Structures are given as structure tokens and as C-alpha cells.
């Protein structure tokens, strides 16, 4: 699960309009039912989304608190989705089919597949993330900024173990490896995506990148990571028919994967920076409320510290709409306290 397909050659078409077009052309009631059912199927890899209790807990959290879901936020999107933000792009069956096609294209023609958000965005995200991690490492080591930073970048980055959520074909990890990161893991709930990523990693000279089938909403990972990357996965989760509930589950799960002092970097084309900040604030409030309840499981020592805003990419091209300046893509980093 990698994100929404941007179409640079047709700038007049927004990602949201593309999602609606995909829905109109692909989604019948039967298709939606079959695809939704696939979210609850368990495999030997533990790739399952719906644990009934966790789903119910997330729904209760939404109903018992005054939290807004992303579709309620004001944003720079041109217009709301007619179907309330739902799309086939939120269903695992869509991604399984997409990566089945891309695997076939790889085997027959050697094609890499889609570069989600485009090469330019990927290069901006990875270069900016590298600089951010080096800066944090310098502060931890009490090293002043000097001309030797670039020469010592590999030393700083060696301590950063990286997880790419919804890695897709794994190309983001290839780019991070080029930037100097070495401890790299990619996960995706689509087995086809993981198989494609493994083939491409071997072919392109990155055999040390690890890939595994895992679902962020029901992760089997027991390891924490100093850097967690999300390029479009939260977007896709939000497009599921149960998107608001699953976004709550997302934050509960991802908070357990980011190590204290580590960072979460989210790149989105469905959410603005302010929307992501507000969603994190909602998560922090919910965790704070749970911690304040002495009878809650969180108060017994299993709660996780919340996130705080750290930085965001400021170099994406912007456009003016309705008197407001916005960008098609937002990348925001959050520090795990």
C-alpha cells in the first residue's frame, strides 16, 4: 500500500478526482463487498486488518470524544469527495490486483512500476529526511554544525534503523540507501508488493534491505524504529469505507513502532500539514485522556508517549486556490517524546 497515484502529465486532475474516477470505473456493490471482506482474512504472514475488539475500541474512541476525522478539516483540496472520501484505493483487493499487474510487467519487461508521488517528491523527501536525522544526531552528540557534516553523514545515519510503512515496490528505501541509511526495513500488507520489492532490491543492488508482509493496523513487528516513513499509507487507510475508525487504529499502532526520541515522517496528498497536525493533536488528547483514567489499561503502564510536531518540507511547489496558498503534497515530521 503506497499511496495515491499523482498524474503530473495531467495537472488539472487532482488526486481526489482520480480516486473518484477509479471508484466510478471499478467499484460495484459486489466488488466493494468482496474487497472489504478481504480485509478480515488472515494469512500465514499475519496480514489481517480487522481484530473485532480493536476495531470496536477505535470506533468507541471516535464516538466518545469530540475528535474530527480528516474529511471534516478545512484544507486546500478543491472540493470534497462526493462519496465522503471512500475509494477502491482504500481496499486491499485493489492493491493486490495492482501489484499482481506490476509483478507481471516486471517479469515480462523488467519494469519497476509506479513511483508514487513521482521521482521529484521522493528525492525531496529522502534528502530532507537525511538532513533532519543528521541534525538530530548532531544534537544528541553535542556536535556543532561544520563543514564536515556531509563527510560524517554515514556515521550519524548508522544509528538510524528505518521502517517504511506500505513500502510498495520499495523504491523509497532504495533512495534512502543512496542517502546513507543502512538499516532498512519495508513492510506492506500486499504479498505481491513485497515480492516485487524483493526482486527490485536484488536487481538494483540493495540486497540488504529487508521486506516482509505486515499490516500496520495489526502489526506483528516487535521491534521499534528510530525513523518510520509513511508515503501515502495513511492516505489509503483514510479512503477505506471505515476510514475514520482505521485512522484511529493507525495512530495507536504506529505510536508503538516509533522508538522514543525517534521520528515519524508522513507524506500525504490527501491531507495538508495543518490537517496532519490536528490529527496528531487528537491522538495526543486521546492518549492523555486514557492515561488520566486510573482504571484504564494505559494507566497500568502500557501507554505510549504522544508525538509532537518537529518540521515539514517547505520546498514543494505551491498553487493558489480560493485565496489560499497550498501544495498538492505535504510532508511532516513528528518527534516521538
Image (spheres, helix red, strand yellow):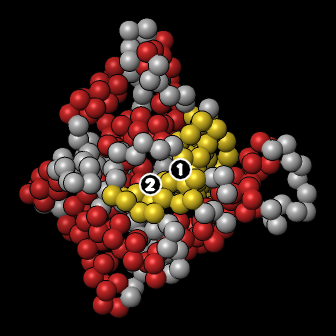
Which residue is more in the foreground, 121 or 328? Answer: 121
Which residue is more in the foreground, 46 or 253? Answer: 46
Quarter-wise, where is residue 94 in the image?
bottom left
Quadrant location, the N terminus? bottom left
Q: Position of residue 185 (x, y in %)?
A: 48, 59
Residue position for label 2? 165
Please say if the residues under marks 2 and 1 sit with CB atoms less than 8 Å apart.
yes
Which residue is more in the foreground, 287 or 178? Answer: 178
Q: Position of residue 325 (x, y in %)?
A: 62, 54
Residue position for label 1? 228
In the rendered image, the residue lying farthest to the top is 294
Residue 174 in view of the camera: yes
Q: Position of residue 134 (x, y in %)?
A: 74, 54
Q: CA distance from mark 2 to mark 1?
A: 7 Å
Give neighbour class at mark 2: few <14, some 14-19, many 20+ (Cα, 10 Å): many
Q: Is residue 334 above or below residue 315?
A: above
Q: Is residue 263 above or below residue 187?
A: above
- The residue depicted at 59 percent of the width and 46 percent of the height is 226
- The residue depicted at 27 percent of the width and 77 percent of the height is 101
Amino acid at each position: 500500500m503506497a499511496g495515491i497515484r499523482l498524474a503530473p502529465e495531467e495537472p488539472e486532475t487532482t488526486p481526489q478526482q482520480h480516486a473518484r474516477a477509479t471508484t466510478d470505473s471499478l467499484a460495484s456493490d459486489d466488488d466493494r463487498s468482496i474487497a472489504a471482506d478481504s480485509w478480515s482474512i488472515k494469512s500465514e504472514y499475519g496480514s489481517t486488518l480487522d481484530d473485532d475488539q480493536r476495531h470496536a475500541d477505535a470506533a468507541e474512541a471516535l464516538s466518545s470524544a469530540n475528535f474530527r476525522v480528516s474529511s471534516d478539516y478545512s484544507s486546500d483540496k478543491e472540493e470534497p469527495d462526493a462519496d465522503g472520501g471512500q475509494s477502491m484505493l482504500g481496499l486491499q483487493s485493489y492493491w493486490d490486483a495492482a501489484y499482481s499487474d506490476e509483478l507481471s510487467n516486471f517479469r515480462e519487461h523488467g519494469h519497476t512500476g509506479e513511483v508514487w508521488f513521482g521521482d521529484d517528491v521522493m528525492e525531496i523527501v529522502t534528502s530532507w529526511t537525511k538532513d533532519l536525522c543528521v541534525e538530530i544526531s548532531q544534537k544528541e552528540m553535542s556536535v556543532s554544525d561544520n563543514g564536515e557534516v556531509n563527510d560524517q553523514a554515514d556515521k550519524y545515519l548508522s544509528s538510524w534503523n528505518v521502517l517504511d510503512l506500505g513500502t510498495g515496490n520499495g523504491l523509497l528505501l532504495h533512495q534512502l540507501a543512496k542517502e546513507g541509511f543502512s538499516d532498512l526495513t519495508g513492510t506492506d500488507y500486499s504479498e505481491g508488493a513485497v515480492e516485487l520489492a524483493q526482486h527490485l532490491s536484488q536487481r538494483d543492488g540493495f540486497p540488504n534491505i529487508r521486506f516482509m508482509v505486515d499490516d500496520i493496523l495489526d502489526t506483528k513487528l516487535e521491534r521499534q524504529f528510530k525513523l518510520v516513513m509513511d508515503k501515502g499509507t495513511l492516505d489509503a487507510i483514510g479512503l477505506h469505507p471505515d476510514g475514520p475508525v482505521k485512522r484511529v487504529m493507525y495512530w495507536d499502532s504506529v505510536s508503538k513502532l516509533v522508538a522514543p526520541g525517534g521520528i515519524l515522517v508522513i507524506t500525504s496528498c490527501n491531507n495538508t500539514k495543518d490537517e496532519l497536525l490536528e490529527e496528531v493533536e487528537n491522538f495526543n488528547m486521546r492518549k492523555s485522556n486514557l492515561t488520566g483514567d486510573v482504571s484504564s489499561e494505559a494507566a497500568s503502564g502500557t501507554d505510549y508517549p504522544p508525538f509532537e510536531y518537529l518540521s515539514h518540507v517547505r520546498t514543494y511547489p505551491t498553487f493558489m486556490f480560493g485565496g489560499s496558498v497550498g501544495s498538492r503534497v505535504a510532508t511532516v515530521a513528528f518527534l516521538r517524546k
